[in-house]
Amino acid sequence: MNEQQAVEKIFQNLTLWRNLPKYQLERRADIFFSLYLKEIMEAKLSTDDNRVELSPAIIPEFPLRHGNENHTVNVDYVMFSKSLSTVYLIEFKTDMGSLRDEQFEYLFKAKKHIEEAGGGFKNILTDLRQVFKATGDKQKYFHLFSLLEQLGFISMSSGIKEKLYSVKKQGVGELIDKIEVIKDISSCEIIMLQPAGFTNEEMAKVRNYDLSAIRQITFADVVNCLNSLKSPFADIFARYVSAWAPRNDGDRSYFAGARSPETIDEELIALKKMQ
């Protein structure tokens, strides 16, 4: 098996296995989407009159403090504009499941928290500092805060690292309290990266949130971007993203498990012929 055959086999397995019980395609495919997420986002956000440029930094599973306890909910990806003036909260789906208010509660709450007067991304980071202090996963949170420091959002003492990676960790909490947020953002966009756009019927099911305020990036948008890159790997990836997308408006046959094994086998043969 050569390299191209190995890559094809990876995407063939994803296409087959997504139809099996409990197999979550998005948790396996997200690494491939992340390779091109910056280009995909810039292509969708830009207009003829305004070229949007993003920071190359991508933070997956970004934690948001939830409620009054130090529990978190996670945003699939967080990205920033190149100027660090806008934060993007990105949710990634490979199947369009049933929509409900609870799915959007923490996204809209975070957006409001960032954009309201007296809010800002600074408040999100201040909340995270509390989680950092309370969590048993302090070393993982240190990696997150180190990335935020590299981006210029926070400043922390080198003593935190020394204590976290030494035998004696006394005093870490006091040093975490001293982490300073030095950069703020007051603009936020919610992005849904998903197979298709919301239908009017789906949007009507969500009563408490205006889904028209969400920027939607469909798999068709992804394919268009990938095809424009003129990359052998991107070309292969684009073929399979097309296979995971609906064929037309209202098509639900692309849902995991919705097509017979024979249909999927025929599709894989057709995809291989497109090499």
Image (cartoon, rainbow, N blue to C red):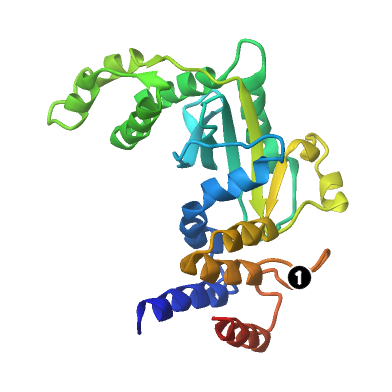
Q: Give the left or right position of residue 200, taking residue 195 as reference.
A: right
Residue type marked 1: Arg
- Where is residue 130? Give x, y as percent: 42, 21
Q: Residue furthest top?
A: 118
Rendered residue at 17%/26% (across/down): 162
Q: Residue at x 35, y 28 (%)?
A: 150
Quadrant the C terminus occupies:
bottom right
Q: Which residue corresponds to the image point at 65% horizontal and 33% vertical from the top-left?
A: 189
**In the image, residue 100 lies at what x, y percent?**
75, 45
Q: Judge from the rendering whether residue 165 lies leftward or rightward of residue 226; answer left or right.
A: left
The answer to whether one can see residue 17 in this image is yes
Residue at left offset 59%, top offset 59%:
228
Label 1: which residue? Answer: 247
- Is 142 rendered above or below residue 185? below
The N terminus sits in image quarter: bottom left
Judged left or right of residue 53, residue 212 is: right
Q: Spot the residue most to the left.
A: 167
Q: Is residue 157 above or below residue 143?
A: above
